[in-house]
Image: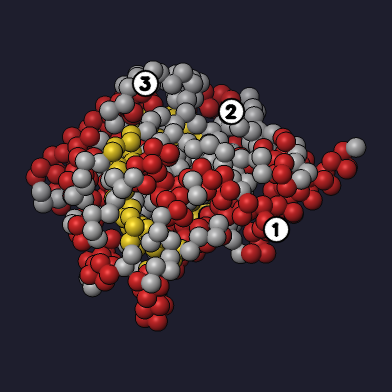
Amino acid sequence: MKPIDVLNNIFGYRDFRPGQEQIIDTLMSGRDCVGIMPTGAGKSITFQIPARILPGTVLVVSPLISLMKDQVDSLQMYGFKAVVINSTLTDGERSSRLEGLRAGKYELVYLAPEALEGSLRNFIKSCPVSMVVVDEAHCISQWGHDFRPAYRKLRGIKNDLGSIPILALTATATEAVTEDIISQLGMNDPDIYRGSFFRPNLIITFQKKGKGINTKKEVLAYLRKNQSQNGIIYCWSRKSVDSMAEYLKDHGINVLAYHAGLSDEIRRLNQEAFIKGNTQVVVATVAFGMGINKPDVRFVIHCNMPRTVESYYQEIGRAGRDGLDSRCIMFYSYSDVINYSFFLKETADPEVKASISRKTKDFFELAESSVCRHKSIVSYFGENMKDCASSCDICGHHSLEDIRKIHKANVSVPVEKNVTAPGNAGIRTDELFLALKDVRKKIAKENNIYAYYYVFNDATLIEMAEKKPTTSGEMLGVKGVGMVKLEKYGAQFLDAIKKFKNKSV
């Protein structure tokens, strides 16, 4: 079986996205690889396809249990033999899955980095592992923005498992972080794919606080004008999260809060409510989002400047994963820099402290500049590009003042400009699309799954509404429809399309 066959037949896509085929070919040849690809670029495909073709098991080291579960559930729906081995399992479940791993029963096994610190590290030496994937690989570097000590224990795993290929994946890695990843994982002359960091569907606006700017009022006004949209509002502390959430609730906005001060159960319920679409807005600290795979997040608002460009880029990357245009609004001031410097006093390593402090000041200077926002951001990661032309407040009409003028004129903000769908300005309000969304919602409810993630995303439904397929063969021509999902859900969508056509005659 060829990689393109898996892409077509299982995932329902006709062509690879940039970088995917190169990474897959590298791994299939037995070489190590570093994939630096922006959020939404399809990183998971690069190891899921080899997992279907190669003998043995692909081990995936991932930092968050919630993210592992979502990915495994999705893979199982595609017919993959995939499991999670983590601390949530009973002793019996763990033993059963470990024996399955040793017997080569699984195509993919997801693990937390901490799992490889104990006896499991020796156990997997006796298992038929074909490849190791290190997701969020920047966590292995002290120069990365989410350093996680457990990742350091991955050093030597390549030799432990017989020099099998290692794939390191990240959406944010400077040259220094990339070199550290390669060193820490003991990679052997890896192929490095560095995709473009430019995401034109993210519309970036920076607004300096002060001079009559009231962040809470601005956020409230935006939410009132965009009530149909899903989004995340980031605040820098638990106290500010609670304050913002309470303010919005007092003014009639249905929001949920998320931060480390809440119980595990409340955090789980609030996260699930957001992913399932039972609530549209979450106010959170940056603890929220790393494990979120929700493609239809239409806005990310920062009430404070993140600590570094890397952090900011990763956080806005939670918006617009489906390719539809989404807003990224950041409120900032120099007081954010001062607040971060106060907490840096707890950092023991003076070199790390100096590096983070410098990065924070660099980000403030970037925010203050009049250079294209996208150009400034990708330049930080070593990429050169022309001005974005229309995807930021420097190049297009996307300043906070412009947004206010549009709102005062009772014209909705033109968020979706590339692909259109019902519900927002510039978005298609046709009847068939809404009918297809109802079918998706019904399927999700009956199967207790996330509609957008496990059935079809909006981009796929938009294409269905445009092409109006009435046979299985025509349905397979829609991007995102493969044989697996066609067999599971195709008949229901085809029926809705036929009813629409009959009614239109």
> According to the image, label 1 marks what residue?
442
Mark nearest the camera among 3 and 2 is: 3
| Image location (x, y in percent) of residue 196 | 38, 30
Question: Tag on residue 417?
Answer: 2
Residue tagged by mark 3? 385
Q: Amino acid at mark 1?
A: Lys
Q: Measured along the vertical axis of the image, is residue 112 above or below residue 143?
A: below
Rate crowding at label 3 as few (under 14), some (14 to 19) or many (20 or more) other CA atoms within 10 Å: some
- Locate residue 14: give its quadrant: top right
The kind of residue on which mark 3 rests is Met
Q: Is residue 379 among the parts visible in the rendering?
A: yes
x and y percentages locating residue 81 in the rendered image: 48, 64
- Outermost residue toward the front in this view: 1
The quarter of the picture where the C terminus appears is: top right
Could you say which is closer to the camera, residue 468 or residue 431? 468
> Residue at position x 61%, y 55% from top?
484
* 3D distance between C-alphas at marks 1 and 3: 44 Å
